Structures are given as structure tokens and as C-alpha cells.
């Protein structure tokens, strides 16, 4: 069997790069994009930042006030996340990816795998040119830069991509894959979290190379058959997962924080109406109808609850969402006495109206 050539493309500092794209003048300043909870000016967390801000040790997930402190005295610019805009940019890039005759698997808003084996006839040299062409095309057509990792499978492509950012192009040939992974810490492998890492450390396994050499039956004893085998294979750069387009999302949802904790229905519905707008927009774009409407709540004590209602008939209607969200909240408020902190709206149970629409569009592009 011919070896596969798999690429992972991961957009550079994505949300912040999108902001630079629409305000080119900020490109040489620290740029931070954050989610503001809306309670006070400063509360919230950093989603991402450009590489200039990263020099000041700003990191994703960090509280915004801390990022502000680290950037004190600079001309840093802070933005509120604008998912709608980032999704648009992402969709444009994914659409161009899909126009290349390779299989594509979008894994998140800023990441996709491409299997280009046939296009490059299994050659990693040709893969380099191919990757450069994709990068140049997107740069001219959309204006976004990204990093690409190329490897014999998804696992190696992903780690290759992470090893050189931003604007990286890292190629790991099949015969180099094991040696490429060997010196890296085990937690670079998907599925090795903190707990597993501690356990492996106790077993004398620190690097992926240590794991690759470790007795496989013993790994199975410790981690169970499927996980043990997965670890053994992954460490040996073996991964046969195909690149396949994911099915449509199974639900569409939005969550938001209320400006204050409350049990006031009108106040809550003001927020959920806003969330419903976004949910409904996604629904229209995907041309789906739904059969299930749910609400999600986080209470002041941080416990969370969901409530759902199944419709008699599939619906495509915004009013159906609004009406059911309202009655779910009315009912819920009658059952609980706690104040509510965060709320969410979700629709699911999708029916697709025209199942072939997408492949047809692809065909006629
Ligand atoms: N993101 C977020 N909160 C996090 C991590 C990420 O909201 N804790 C969002 C913002 C990022 C996007 O997801 O732009 C993609 O995440 P990545 O991990 O790929 O990070 P970036 O694209 O920002 O940077 P990099 O250049 O390191 O890929
Ligand atoms: Ca990224
Ligand atoms: Ca990413």
C-alpha cells in the first residue's frame, strides 16, 4: 500500500489575525481578543492574542485584567470576540480548501486535515510545493496566514504543525516520524492529560520515545486494552484514522452570562432572545429543521441544569424557539429558587431538507 500524505492546516493566532485583517493599522501593536462576561469592564478571559502580545507573556485563558497589566505602557488593543466574523473568514478558507481535489476534515474553526496523497502521488517533496501553493492562495484570496504540518497520518501532521508556528511548514516523512516524535513529552499525544502523564512518569515514561519502547502488554495492563494499544501505536507514529469530513453538527447552541444574577423572566428572555438570533442564523445557513429546543442554566452556586422540549413536528421557525424557550424558563423558575447566572439556548434533532445540496454545490464549483 502506498503511504498516505496528510496535512494539518492551523490558522495563526486566529481570532487576533482576523481583527488585524479588518484593521491593518494595528498589525504592529499587541492585539488581544477576549470574552468579556459583561459584569465589569475588566472581567473576562483572553481568547487569544497576536505574537507581539505573546512576547509580553499574554496567554489564552488568562484573565483580561492580567493581560492588561502585562501590557501596561504599550499601545495594546483589546477586542471583544466576534464569532460571527471569525466564522465567516473560516468558512471562506474552508471553501477554498474544499476546492482542492483532496479529502478534507474540518476539526475546528481554525483547523482542518487534508489528505493529499493522490494529488502529490505519495511524494513528500511534491507535498511541500502543494502546501506552499495552498498557503499562497489563501494569503492572496483571504489574507490569512496559517501553519501546515505534513506527515504520513493525522497524528504526525498535527504534531508537526504545532512544532513551527506562525506561518510554519513542517514536513515529516514516514521514515522520520518515529525519531521526530521520540524526544517530545508524552503529553503532546492526544489523550495524555495531567493524570495520565503523572501515571506514566511513575512508570519511567517521560518522552514519546520512552512510551514507544515500553512493553505493550504492560501498557494494556495499566491503561486497559484500547487505550494501552492506542498509546503504543501513537508513540510509534502509527495512526490509521482516515481524513473524513465530519457530519453536520448535531446541535446549534449559544450561551451567555447575564449582566446580573436574576430570577426575572423578562430580563432572562432579553438575553435568550439575543442568543436565539445567533442560533437561528446558523440554522438558516445550514438549511436544517429541528425537533428539540433546550435551555441551559448556570445557577449562582455554579450548578448547571438543562431542560428540553420535543416538538410534534420539525420546525424551521424562530418563533418556535422563542416560544419554547420562554415556556421552559417559566416552568423552570417555578421549580427552583436559586438565582441564575448564565443561560443558553440549544436546538437539535435536525432534519436535513436537501441531503445532497452540499455535495452538489461542491461538484459544480
Ligand atoms: N481560543 C479560545 N480560548 C482558548 C484557546 C483558543 O477562545 N483558551 C480560540 C481563539 C483562537 C482559536 O480558538 O484564535 C484557535 O485556537 P488555537 O489554539 O489554534 O490558537 P491561535 O490560533 O490563537 O494561535 P496559534 O497561532 O498558536 O495557533
Ligand atoms: Ca491556530
Ligand atoms: Ca487550532
Image (cartoon, helix red, strand yellow):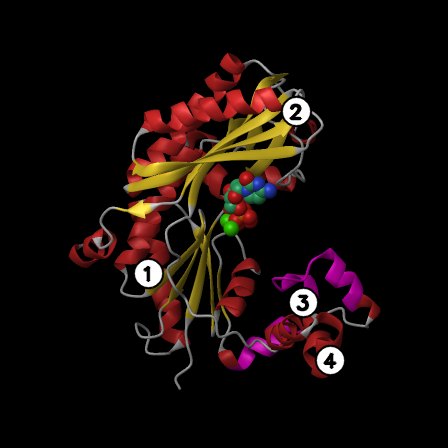
- Label 3's element? loop
Which of the marked residues, 4 or 3, is nearer the chain's N terminus? 3
Name which of mark 2 and mark 1 comes first in the sequence: 2
The residue wearing badge 1 is 133
The quadrant the N terminus occupies is: bottom left
Which of the two discs, 2 and 4, sits closer to the camera? 4
Foreground: disc 1 or disc 4: 4
Q: Residues within 10 Å of mark 1 (few under 14, many from 20)?
A: few
Q: Which residue is mark 3?
A: 184
- What's the distance in space between the residues labelled 2 and 4, CA to CA? 51 Å
Tag 4 or tag 2, which sits nearer the N-term? 2
- Residue at 41% in and 73% down: 5
**Relative image position of residue 33 (x, y in whole percent):** 54, 33
Measure the alpha-carbon separation of dots 1 and 4: 40 Å
Residue 24's spot in the image, x, y percent?
A: 41, 33
Going from the N terminus, do you reach mark 3 or mark 1 first?
A: 1
Numbered circle sitting on residue 214? 4
Return the residue at label 2. Answer: 73
The magenta span reads 175-200
Which residue is the extreme one toward the front? 312
How far is mark 3 from mark 1, CA to CA?
30 Å
Q: Name the residue located 35 percent from the left edge and 28 percent from the top edge.
A: 320
Of tags 4 and 3, the one toward the viewer is: 4
Q: Are marks 2 and 1 in contact (CB under 8 Å)?
A: no
Amino acid at each position: 500500500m502506498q503511504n498516505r500524505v496528510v496535512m494539518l492546516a492551523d490558522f495563526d493566532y486566529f481570532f487576533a489575525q482576523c481583527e488585524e485583517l479588518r484593521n491593518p493599522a494595528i498589525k504592529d501593536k499587541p492585539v488581544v481578543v477576549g470574552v468579556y462576561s459583561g459584569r465589569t469592564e475588566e472581567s473576562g478571559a483572553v481568547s487569544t492574542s497576536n505574537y507581539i502580545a505573546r512576547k509580553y507573556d499574554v496567554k489564552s485563558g488568562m484573565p483580561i485584567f492580567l493581560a492588561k497589566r502585562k501590557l501596561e505602557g504599550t499601545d495594546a488593543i483589546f477586542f471583544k470576540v466576534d464569532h460571527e466574523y471569525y466564522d465567516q473568514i473560516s468558512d471562506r478558507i474552508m471553501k477554498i480548501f474544499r476546492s482542492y481535489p483532496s479529502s478534507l476534515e474540518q476539526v475546528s474553526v481554525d483547523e482542518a486535515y487534508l489528505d493529499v496523497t493522490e494529488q502529490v502521488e505519495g511524494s513528500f517533496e511534491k507535498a511541500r510545493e502543494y502546501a506552499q501553493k495552498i498557503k499562497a492562495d489563501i494569503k492572496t484570496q483571504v489574507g490569512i496566514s496559517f501553519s501546515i504540518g505534513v506527515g504520513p497520518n493525522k497524528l504526525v501532521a498535527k504534531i508537526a504543525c504545532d512544532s513551527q508556528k506562525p506561518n510554519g511548514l513542517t514536513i515529516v516523512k514516514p521514515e522520520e516520524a518515529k525519531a521526530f516524535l521520540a524526544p517530545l513529552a508524552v503529553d503532546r499525544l492526544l489523550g495524555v492529560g495531567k493524570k495520565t502523564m503523572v501515571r506514566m512518569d511513575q512508570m519511567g515514561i517521560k518522552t514519546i520515545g520512552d512510551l514507544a519502547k515500553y512493553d505493550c502488554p504492560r501498557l494494556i495492563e495499566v491503561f486497559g486494552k484500547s487505550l494501552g494499544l492506542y498509546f503504543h501505536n501513537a508513540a510509534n507514529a502509527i495512526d490509521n484514522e482516515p481524513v473524513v469530513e465530519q457530519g453536520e453538527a448535531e446541535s446549534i447552541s449559544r450561551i451567555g452570562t447575564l449582566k446580573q444574577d436574576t430570577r426575572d423572566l423578562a430580563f432572562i428572555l432579553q438575553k435568550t432572545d439575543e442568543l436565539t438570533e445567533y442560533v437561528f442564523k446558523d440554522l438558516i445557513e445550514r438549511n436544517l429543521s429541528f425537533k428539540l429546543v433546550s435551555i441551559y442554566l448556570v445557577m449562582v452556586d455554579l450548578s448547571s441544569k438543562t431542560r428540553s422540549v420535543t416538538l410534534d413536528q420539525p420546525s424551521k421557525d424562530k418563533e418556535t424557539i422563542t416560544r419554547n424557550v420562554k415556556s421552559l424558563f417559566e416552568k423552570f423558575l417555578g421549580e427552583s429558587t436559586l438565582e441564575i447566572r448564565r443561560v443558553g439556548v440549544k436546538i437539535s434533532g435536525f432534519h436535513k431538507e436537501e441531503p445532497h445540496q452540499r455535495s452538489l454545490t461542491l461538484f459544480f464549483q
